[in-house]
Amino acid sequence: MTSNSNGESHLAIDCHKLDFSWNQDSELVLEGVDLNLGKGSRCLLIGANGAGKSTLLRILAGKRLTKTRACKILGQDVFMNPPNGVVYLGTEWSTNPVVRSDIVVSEFLDSVGGYRHKERRDRLLSILDVDLDWHMHQISDGERRRVQLCMGLMTEWDVLLLDEVTVDLDVLVRSDLINFLIQETETRGATIVYATHIFDGLSSFPTHICHLQLGRTPRPLHVWEATSGVEDLFKLALQWTREDRDLRRIKEKETGRVRGPKKADEVSVLQRFAAASFDSSPTSSYVRWHRCLLSSKRRKTPKCSSKSTTTRTDGEYSIVSFSDVVD
């Protein structure tokens, strides 16, 4: 990490060799991730579904604890000593029952300090086209998302972490928001990391692009030159995502895991299961069939007896569909 004579870091985000897993015995979700961004940077985070983008953003926001102290924002540990001025906006906000209750938008914004930032709040109300008289339980998902963005952006932030929060916006509001974010980085030196799968109208947004592939950063941070006209952002994302899928399929094949239609032997197990009759011991039958289906995936020829699976509900027996068992 570089710093000036006063010991202040030049990097807004300093993430080096980051590892993360959900628990001690599970596989790494993130492994050796590097992300170093100077102040004023705008970074797009690109990767397939399940690559670890949301997990990385939540770690940077201090919402996930890692064993290795590998991430700093503005020179401070993101979890043990989180700095002020970091804003994380994710999609989970809109599912909170509180923000779907009968609350007037003006009261909702005031409850989180909107009255203290009236000038900036009013600017965002215009950019996001928000009506202060809206009731949160009566508006659409896209309008509710606008309220979230207004709430999150109305204080002056130094680092902004966005996780797919523009997916609900119409093209006009999204374009106006992108222009606002660019101005924030250019005039205040703020830094943005933005995970998205929608690249329309974004060619002038990023200064850098980070490729996250199966929890790793396989290539150095890509410097984006929007005015060069040589690269197409969508085509670049498509190329990288196709590489991600090909690599994932190779790794899954090595472990015997294949997405899509099941092989003939696995289908025959399900067919025999569907045609089976009740067993006199429902509980033992369930356990036997569950183990049978799991073990059959490890053998070329399944050896399951034709026993039905049942479960006990309020003293009664009922059939459990094999989709429940397979899951």
Image (spheres, rainbow, N blue to C red):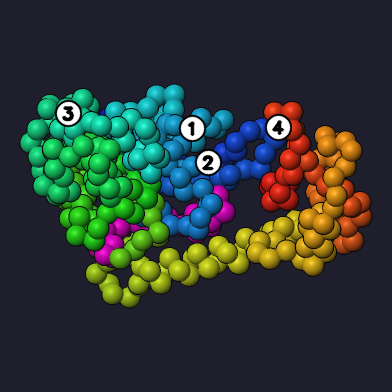
Over which residues does the magenta segment extend? Answer: 201-219
Q: Earlier in the sequence, mark 4 or mark 1?
A: 1
The residue at which mark 3 appears reads as 107
Would residue 24 appear left or right of 43 to someone viewing this image? right
Was residue 278 drawn as part of the magenta stretch in this picture? Answer: no
Instruction: Tell me residue 248's x, y (percent).
Output: 62, 60
The residue at which mark 1 appears reads as 64
Disc 1 to disc 3, C-alpha distance: 31 Å
Nearer the camera: disc 2 or disc 4 = 4
The residue at which mark 2 appears reads as 18
Disc 3 to disc 4, C-alpha distance: 46 Å
Q: Which type of secondary structure does the marked residue at label 4 adopt?
A: strand
Q: Amino acid at mark 3?
A: Glu
Disc 2 to disc 3, C-alpha distance: 41 Å
Provide the major secondary structure of the magenta segment. Answer: loop
Disc 2 to disc 4, C-alpha distance: 46 Å
Q: Which type of secondary structure does the marked residue at label 1 adopt?
A: loop
Q: Amino acid at mark 1?
A: Arg
Q: Name the foreground residue: 192 vs 116.
A: 116
| Residue 277 visible in the picture | yes
Q: Which type of secondary structure does the marked residue at label 2 adopt?
A: strand
Instruction: Tell me residue 6's x, y (percent).
Output: 27, 30
Nearer the camera: disc 1 or disc 2 = 1
Q: Earlier in the sequence, mark 2 or mark 4?
A: 2
Q: Are marks 2 and 4 in contact (CB under 8 Å)?
A: no
Nearer the camera: disc 3 or disc 4 = 4
Give residue 74's quadrant in the image: top left
Nearer the camera: disc 4 or disc 1 = 4
Was residue 216 drawn as part of the magenta stretch in this picture? Answer: yes
